[in-house]
Amino acid sequence: MAAVLRKLIQGRLPALAGVLCRRSGNEGHLFLNSSGSTLMQPRCGYSSPTESVIVEMDKATGVALLKLNIPPVNSLSLPLLTELAIVLDKLEMDKHCRGLILTSAVPNIFSAGLNLFDMMDKPNEHYSEFWRAVQEIWIKLYGSSLANIAAINGSSPAGGCLLALCSDYRIMANNPHFTIGLNETRLGIVAPFWFKDTLLNTVGKRTTEISLNLGALYSPTEALSLHLVDRLVPETQLLSAATEEMGRWLQVPDHARQITKSMIRKSTLEGLLNQREADIKNFVEFISRDSIQKSLQFYAQSLQKQKQHIHPPSSSCRQQISSVTFARSPWYSLIQRS
Ligand SMILES: CCCC/C=C/CC(=O)SCCNC(=O)CCNC(=O)[C@H](O)C(C)(C)COP(=O)(O)OP(=O)(O)OC[C@H]1O[C@@H](n2cnc3c(N)ncnc32)[C@H](O)[C@@H]1OP(=O)(O)O
């Protein structure tokens, strides 16, 4: 455990490192940043200038309710990811904040996942910046020291599902029209190894094999049976159920819960932290391919024109994404290695 703590403080797991310093008896607002230097942090206040991330802080309980608020579908665009990262940092460093409930302010949608248009027809520099922001959110959420509960009040495909998977506990509204899952293969793209690892850690190997390969999206009842979510409640009771569940998590002393969480998630986090730049390079190389661009364009157009729910690309589109494309892809070999 000493080695774990040392690595944390060296900045290998920045979010947890900040907290361990903060929770270990420092009365003021001194924290270590990821390079080990001290920072002065504000006591409170996380208003998001564009209101795309709404934060309601309950000072009595130390629980922040964070609502994604980018209609129509809370797609995770570069500006939203950037804003979310700032909000998460502020919550992490607020010594009064102990828990985070993540939900959506958009009816029927938790999050549609990554913004397709950030992955289409852009220069490589944009892809690189975008992917770094995606990584950043995963590192902050999966490595968060806060007790983190997802109140999933709508559909949650791909990156939306990943956000929920980063939580410590997932409660979903029991509406059969909602779906959740990592459906990347259906778009002709491949979920990176750390998406896969996050799913694997939650539902186990066999379910990961089936759901990732098929790009499966599950109804709330199916998701519960696979332990993709932990509990279903009627939509009207979602927030009260999340608040009640948070009470259970906050009964545990913070330091004990945080160190335990770190032990469980550390190796998965390090999987990405140790190769962030290579992961970005692989993403840029993969996403900028003509065949992948065509596949994404086809998918985005079908969403826009037909207003349909998830469906696979047509056979003509599938032909463009041959198995050779994936076999040669660094993403493929990354998945093979991990
Ligand atoms: C290569 C390495 C791996 C990269 C990893 C990627 C992970 C990802 O997250 S990829 C993104 C995957 N996301 C999806 O497949 C979700 C697609 N969207 C939907 O299935 C549906 O929109 C919905 C179930 C979320 C909601 O359905 P609903 O009927 O309510 O709304 P729509 O009419 O379909 O959509 C409204 C509007 O929003 C646009 N839109 C939907 N999803 C996205 C998105 N992910 N990015 C950008 N824009 C999106 C949709 O085109 C509609 O636009 P218009 O109003 O202009 O037609």
Image: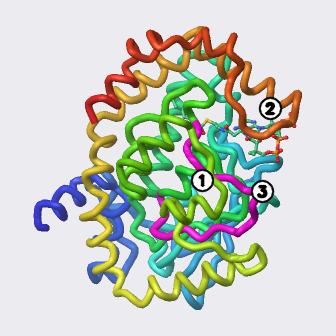
Residue occupied by mark 1: 84
Quarter-of-image position of residue 277: top left
On screen, 274 above or below 24? Answer: above
Q: Residue 42, position in %: x, y?
A: 51, 69
Q: Which mark is residue 303?
A: 2
The reply to whether residue 82 is in sight is no
How crowded pointer 2 is (Cα within 10 Å; few <14, some 14-19, many 20+) is rated as some
- Report how far apart the C-alphas of labels 2 and 3 lie in the structure: 17 Å
Looking at the image, residue 164 lies above or below residue 148: above
Residue plotted at (72% across, 25% down): 299
Return the residue nearer the eye: 272 or 321.
321
* Alpha-carbon span between mark 2 and mark 1: 25 Å
Measured from the top left, where is residue 292 in percent x and y? 58, 16
Q: Viewer-proximal residue, 35 or 70?
A: 70
Q: Magenta residues, as a range?
A: 166-183
Residue at horizontal 62 percent and vertical 39 percent from the top: 114
Task: Tell me the amino acid under the disc marked 3.
Answer: His
- Which residue lies at the image location 75% right of the left edge and 61% below the top edge? 176
| Real-space Cα separation, disc 1 to disc 3, in angstroms | 27 Å
Q: Which SS does the magenta portion mostly show?
A: loop
Query: Which structural element holds mark 2?
Result: helix
Cβ(mark 2) to ligand 1 < 8 Å?
Answer: yes
Q: Which mark is residue 177?
A: 3
Secondary structure state at the residue bearing disc 3: loop
Q: Position of residue 226 (x, y in %)?
A: 49, 60
